């Protein structure tokens, strides 16, 4: 059972740990710096932290298991843009938006998704990175577009535990893409999604879908969940087909989803009010859970603010531990809550942290 977790914020990285009584903030790192993503690598205990330093660019730091010291390693970087390129996108990494470890048979392999929408791979624990040209060069990329950001970005990276060469990624706004050969070739995997924000004749176009977050169930890898810009979708065939879930309460808009590590029928969401408002649904924070593949949902509110609550939970702001019972959630207004009963009751970790970008368990 997890007893340590990490919170990446606008003003640093915070570690929390559990005592016999409750969870508490333990240590702070990179205080004052935006930490856009944190990856605890469970293969060897390494911890990675991505920083977004504005004028100084995106940075990546690594802390080895058993060490108190952070070492700066290489950050993903695009090659020089050809002078004759017609690509309107600037080939400069603005932010490391997602990090994922390769499979257990790939020691040292890391994946990184960036703004703009580049996917990068490292074979040496972040010492060097290579742009995955196979995805960058798909013809459909010209139709990718920004959602909340001005440029498209890769926020979800789902490695298949059965085959490390099989990876599914989510792009806002660019749909979902799958490789089965380690990144050499890619195919669209957004069939069934629908973009209500587009003209009707374009709503079904796969490469302009905005999957806010995609997660895979490790114990049932063919089962994937997606919180889309205008709904919740699930797939039971590794993303080949997606089906909309119509029974979600409160709102079909939100940014985050989490899936039970063993049970692909169980998933959690945080409903919000759409588009320009981007606050907790009805100004009262709730976490919704389904245990039957989306046929029914329960809205859990115990311990969460229910009046004048304008918190929003970002794409990486909800995590579930390996046991499937402990959840950690962080909001844009610095609230952090933890549940030890699958989301039924929440304890407050803090309401005064900086805006939270990501949470994860060790």
Image: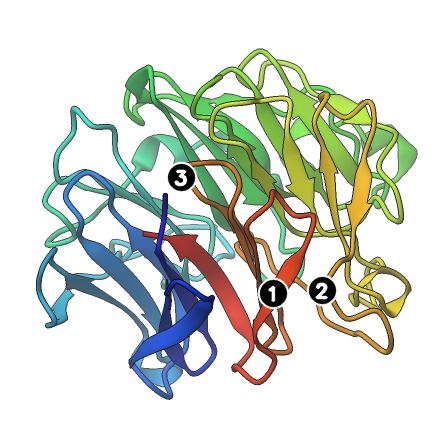
Colour pattern of the rendering: rainbow
Q: Nearer the viewer, mark 2 or mark 3?
A: 2
Distance from the alpha carbon under mark 3 to that under mark 1: 43 Å
For the residue labelled by badge 2, is the local secondary structure a helix, a strand or a loop? loop
Q: CA distance from mark 1 to mark 2?
A: 6 Å
Say above or below: 277 vs 165: below
Instruction: Give 296 or 180, whichever is nearer the viewer.
Output: 296
Q: Quick one: SS at disc 3?
A: helix
Query: Residue 347 got which mark?
Result: 1
For the residues labelled 2 and 3, the Cα–Cα distance comes to 44 Å
Residue 313, numbered circle: none
Q: Residue at x 71, y 22 (%)?
A: 293
Identify residue for label 3. 136
Residue 258, located in which quarter of the rendered image? Answer: top right
> In the rendering, at what x and y percent does residue 353 appear?
52, 81
User: Contact (CB < 8 A) between labels 1 and 2?
Assistant: yes
Q: Which residue is mark 2?
A: 303
Residue 114: tell me if it is visible. no
Crowding at mark 3 (Cα within 10 Å: few <14, some 14-19, many 20+): some
Above or below 271: residue 331: below
Residue 158 x, y percent position in the rendering: 43, 32
First in sequence, mark 1 or 2: give its number.
2
247 and 128: which one is in front? Answer: 247
Q: In the depicted view, which residue is nearer to us: 14 or 205?
A: 14
Q: Position of residue 317 (x, y in %)?
A: 55, 58
């Amino acid at each position: 059972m997890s007893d340590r977790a990490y919170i990446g914020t606008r003003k640093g990285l915070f570690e929390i740990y559990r005592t016999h009584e409750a969870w508490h903030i333990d240590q702070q790192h990179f205080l004052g710096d935006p930490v856009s993503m944190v990856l605890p690598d469970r293969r060897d205990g390494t911890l990675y932290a991505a920083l977004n330093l504005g004028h100084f660019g995106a940075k990546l730091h690594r802390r080895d298991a058993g060490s108190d010291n952070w070492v700066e390693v290489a950050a993903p970087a695009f090659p020089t843009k050809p002078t004759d390129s017609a690509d309107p996108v600037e080939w400069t990494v603005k932010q490391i938006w997602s990090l994922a470890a390769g499979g257990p048979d790939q020691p040292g392999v890391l994946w990184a998704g960036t703004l703009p929408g580049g996917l990068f791979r490292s074979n040496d624990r972040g010492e060097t990175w290579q742009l995955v040209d196979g995805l960058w060069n798909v013809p459909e990329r010209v139709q990718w577009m920004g959602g909340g950001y001005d440029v498209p970005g890769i926020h979800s990276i789902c490695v298949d535990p059965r085959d490390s060469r099989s990876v599914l990624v989510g792009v806002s706004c660019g749909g979902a893409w799958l490789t089965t050969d380690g990144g050499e070739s890619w195919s669209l995997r957004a069939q069934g999604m629908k973009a209500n924000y587009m003209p009707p004749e374009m709503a079904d176009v796969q490469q302009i879908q905005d999957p806010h977050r995609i997660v895979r169930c490790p114990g049932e890898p063919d089962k994937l969940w997606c919180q889309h810009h205008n709904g919740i979708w699930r797939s039971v065939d590794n993303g080949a087909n997606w089906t909309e879930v119509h029974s979600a309460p409160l709102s079909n808009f939100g940014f985050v989803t989490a899936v039970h590590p063993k049970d692909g029928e169980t998933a959690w969401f945080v409903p919000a009010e759409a588009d320009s408002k981007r606050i907790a649904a009805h100004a009262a924070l709730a976490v919704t859970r389904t245990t039957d593949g989306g046929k029914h949902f329960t809205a859990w509110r115990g311990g969460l603010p229910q009046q004048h609550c304008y918190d929003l939970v970002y794409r990486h702001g909800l995590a579930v531990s390996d046991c499937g019972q402990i959840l950690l959630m962080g909001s844009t207004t610095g609230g952090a809550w933890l549940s030890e009963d699958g989301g039924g009751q929440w304890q407050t970790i803090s309401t005064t942290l900086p805006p939270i970008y990501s949470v994860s368990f060790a």
